[in-house]
Amino acid sequence: MKMNLKNKIVCIVMAVLLFGLSVFAIARPKDEYSDTERRLLSQMPAVTVKSVMNGTFMTEFEDYTLDQFPHREAFRTLKALVVKYVFNNSQNNDIYIHDGYYAAQQYPLNTQSIDHVAKVFNSVCDRYFAEGDYNLYFSVIPDKGYFLQEQAKQLPLDYETLVDSLRAQVPQLSYIDIFDTLQLTNFYKTDTHWRQETLTDCADMLLSAMNAKNDVQYIEKELSVPFYGVYYGQAALPAQPEQIRYLDADLFAEVTVYDHENRKQIGVYDLQKANGKDPYEFFLSGPLSLITIENPDASTDRELFLFRDSFGSSIAPLFIGSYSKITLMDIRYLQSAMLGNFVDFTEGSDILFLYSSMILNDGTTLK
Amino acid sequence: MLFSSIPFLYYFLPCVLLLYAIAPKRLKNTVLMLTSLVFYGWGEPKYVILMVATIAIGYVTGLLIEKWIDTKPRLAKLMLIVSVAFCLGFLGYFKYANFFVENFVALTGLSVKALNVALPIGISFYTFQILSYSVDVYRKDVPAQKNPVNLAAYIAMFPQLIAGPIVRYSDIAEQLVNRTHTWDKTAAGIRRFILGLAKKVLLANILGEVCDAFKASDDKSVLFFWLYAVCYMLHVYFDFSGYSDMAIGLGHLFGFRFVENFNYPYIAASVTEFWRRWHISLGSWFRDYVYIPLGGNRVGKLRHCFNIFVVWMLTGFWHGADWTFIVWGIYFAILLMIEKFFLLKYLKKTKIVNHIYVLLFVLFSFVIFNASDMGEAVQYLGGLFGIGGYPLVSESFFWYLRNYLPILLVGCVGATPAIKTACNKLHENKTADRVLNVMEPLVLIALLLTVTAFLVDGSYNPFLYFRF
């Protein structure tokens, strides 16, 4: 091929690519939401003298061009494939995959975060449980990394130190160890969360440590919607959808579940949410700051106050048979200092702080 | 606006190319000037005024210098002083005022309010260009530019505005009024630009991730220090030379030929040679406008040492207003003096030791260069030799080595002319030449799409020159 012809081809091909993508980027209809990343996409910012002069327009415009780039998902997948197969890097966007399981590296241990969490737990206990008779417990839910990090050759989070550090700082709480009741298969492959249908042993361990009994018979059911977890979107690599299975019981039809945040009655399971952006919100309608579950058929008048994160949504239904009332509080969304305005902590109740290691290691969100 | 960004690649650049292509010849510099001001204003809207003022001063003083140089030499000299004073004044205030105030406070203990002056991007590059223009006109090396648009297009030209190379007016004065646009030049520009873009996004940025992770890590070890130092050495090379490649490539697209800025510096056999291959435009600028006017090497030994010391201290200080940069410059001054008066003759006799010596001492220099302060520089240099109680290895070292080894190897090979030499050899073979010719557009497409993918995913994309 003559040099001149080759140079012409290079110029024409690259011009077509550059101008083609440019025109496509400008002209294409804009997306509002990314299903895989579960977030709203940036839109064209308004041009004002102020926003141009202080640079916010430029920053927002850059976000907009990234979010609205044509075939964005395909480009994200291309990057993930290059990182994985060309650069041989085990992580893309901090997500690694081993044996089909997607996980985020939690390393290193954030001691400041653990200290903060301990401070919040102690402050809650001092404020609400210093006087009166309460049974105080805490437990740590390991994330998938606990089971994967060694075989996937990832930098290890020191779970032992995490737990020991927390135990040492919250002596008034009795620790319930559930690590041995869990294994990798208790978790969704592409999501952070655990699978409810596999949690009966774990729930029994927690209940037994709190001297509660559970003899509810469950029926395992399956949702028909395909489930892609949160790591699927972050990793940007192709994956098979999973199915959400759940444990149902006749008892669940009898209980009253109340969402105090939106002041309405909800169900133990929310089929509408199952078809929404995050099907995991099927369990107790997802991230709500304050929920109460009342069981009129309970053979006891014991109450459980559960300080929890999103993992609590799926395990809490398995506690229903053991208590007359369960109050779920998410102090990421509700200031713990304000809880007294909304919750009446009945004396003699069980108090359980149940948090995943991910939240504890990034616990600045706890208020 | 960064070259390695979606707004530049798919919004700004196509618009500029289109406007430039349809503009008649006499308006092409106007298009370049206006689009360059938009480019600059995108990142620093308020500092466009500063840049325009600096250009105006350079333009007016240039004309007056030329007018009076033969008839009223004193006034011509005064105009030169005015131009130099304004350029250095702006540079001194915006870049160094904070540094001087902080050090004054530290030295005297007096309570002086911090100025907190923001540094306009690219000020070190464009003030140096105006300085060289004024000096060249004063020396009668070039005629003053009569057309303000042409001068503004030269100084503000966006391809070289924020990260160099420092293009001398004398090198492109002719091209400003008379330049050609050919398929060959355009294709060469595209090739060079995409190669630079890939160096920046696919090599420099990824190696930079290791450097940032190391700095944040509590799991440092001796070998992790070495891994960091090697990664930073490659990171800064691919970042800076990638930017220069993009600038030179863009220059080609607009019909210009800019000076080369990097020539495989890590294959140098001495530190003296390293500086002939690293940031060539800056080295030659200081040589021509500081070192030679000070007397260069045509002076006594002591004065020669002083000249080297001053030039390299200023070179270091040019890179940033911090003691680490000054020490970095002095470090090279000392090495260059040692080589000049003693070591060079021995280095010429070796074939491997000299390269190891250069790589090691350049590596140490970049540890100082990238340190946040001198305390960290000393800590990191000590860490390389196990001082500070660090273990030999750590889990983090193994993790980063395992996950970044391929990119590290590509970086090591890419920092040498091996790939270029191999391609040139292959072109000598007819069949291989045909294959390479067919492959070239495909490789360019693959590189552009891959870079786009990394940018779209919002990857790590630092800009190193905000302190320059």
Image (cartoon, coloured by chain):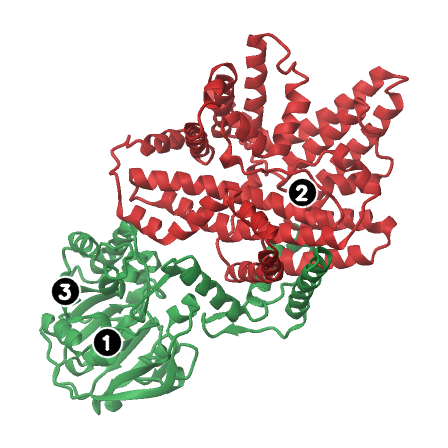
Instruction: State the residue at coordinates (52%, 67%).
Output: A75
- Which disc number belongs to residue B160? 2
Quadrant in which the C terminus of chain A is drawn: bottom left
Quadrant in which the N terminus of chain A is drawn: bottom right
Q: Which residue is mark 1?
A: A315
For the residues labelled 2 and 3, the Cα–Cα distance comes to 61 Å
Earlier along the polypeptide chain: callout 3 or callout 1? 3
Determine the image quadrant of residue A225: bottom left
Q: Mark 2 or mark 1: which is in front?
A: 2
Where's residue B348, x and y in %? 49, 23
Q: Are marks 2 and 3 in contact (CB under 8 Å)?
A: no
Where's residue B213, x and y in %? 38, 47
Residue B45 in sight from this viewpoint = no
Where's residue B372, x and y in %? 44, 35
- Which disc number belongs to residue A177? 3
Q: Is residue A207 left or right of residue B19?
A: left
What amino acid type is highlighted by mark number 2?
Gln
Where's residue A230, x and y in %? 38, 70
Dot 2 lies on which element? helix
Give neighbour class at mark 2: few <14, some 14-19, many 20+ (Cα, 10 Å): many
Is residue B331 depicted above or below B155 in this figure?
above
Name of the residue lying farthest toward the front: B430
Determine the image quadrant of residue A61: bottom right
